[in-house]
Image (cartoon, grey):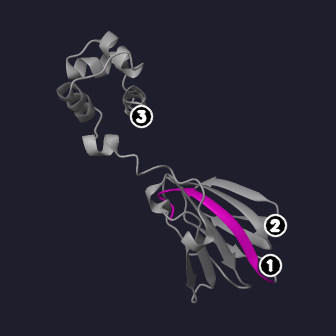
Amino acid sequence: MEIGQKIKTLRLQKGLTQEELGERTNLTKGYISQLERNLNSPSIETLFAILEVLGTTPKEFFDDGDAQKIVCKREEQTEYADEELKYSIRWLIPSSNEKEIEPVLITLPEGGRFKKFEPSLAETFIYVLKGKIRLHLGKEKYTAAKGDSLYFEAKYPHQVVNASRGESVFLLAATHSYL
């Protein structure tokens, strides 16, 4: 990626207009526009001032080593089994605790239940791949079978239990504050 495009991407991520970035760096909106279109090159001093306002370091700005990981192989996934509650969980992406959404695959044998969660600001999506599950959400209960999905805001205590005579498997994707 070119310097101008990187500056523009960071500016937009910070929610700044070209004018706001210019004001915070003592540069004009027109100059910021030229930089972003690669029509002008900043001096080192100017670039460092822009990067400071954008909340990054020169090393982070120029480091292309943190390319977005698109495919996560099975061997990169982490698994955990809870023998007391009788569930197993597989984190589907290795860096899920650093992301906004945390996708996991949960297996519940007959009589199994996933851990109970307190209310939070998380949003949760569940897709049932096998069997049947029951969501206890506050005082309500919702049942979903293979092919069904659930979507809820986690503002009440909640827990998922196996509701079938056999194994149930479901995909759960929640905003980070869930797991």
Q: Position of residue 111 (x, y in %)?
A: 71, 85
Residue at mark 2: 145
The structure residue drawn at horizontal position 37% and vertical position 30%, both measured from the top left corner, is 3
Residue at figure coordinates x 38%, y 15% from the top left? 39
Quarter of the image where one finds residue 20: top left
Judge by depth and name the residue closer to the eye, 34 or 124: 34
Residue wearing tag 3: 13
Which amino acid type corresponds to the residue marked 1 in the rendered image? Ser
Secondary structure under the numbered disc 1 in the rendered image:
loop
Q: Sequence-wise, which precedes: disc 1 or disc 3?
A: 3
* Cα distance in 3D space between marks 2 and 1: 9 Å
Picture coordinates of residue 33 (x, y %)?
Answer: 37, 15
Please identify the quarter of the rendering in which residue 102 is found. Answer: bottom right
Q: Residues within 10 Å of mark 3 (few under 14, many from 20)?
A: few
User: Compared to 138, does 69 lie above or below?
Assistant: above
Q: Which residues are magenta?
A: 166-179
Q: Are marks 2 and 1 in contact (CB under 8 Å)?
A: yes
Residue 131 at x, y = what percent? 80, 73
Work out whether mark 2 precedes mark 3 in sequence or the reverse, and give the earlier one. 3
Element under disc 2: strand
Residue receiving disc 1: 164
Front residue of 169 and 62: 62
How far apart marks 1 and 3 lie (CA) works out to 45 Å
Front residue of 10 and 99 = 10
The answer to whether one can see residue 84 in this image is yes
Q: Nearer the viewer, residue 8 or 59?
A: 59
In which quadrant is the N terminus drawn? Answer: top left
Query: For numbered disc 3, what is the local secondary structure?
Result: helix
Q: Nearer the viewer, mark 1 or mark 3?
A: 3
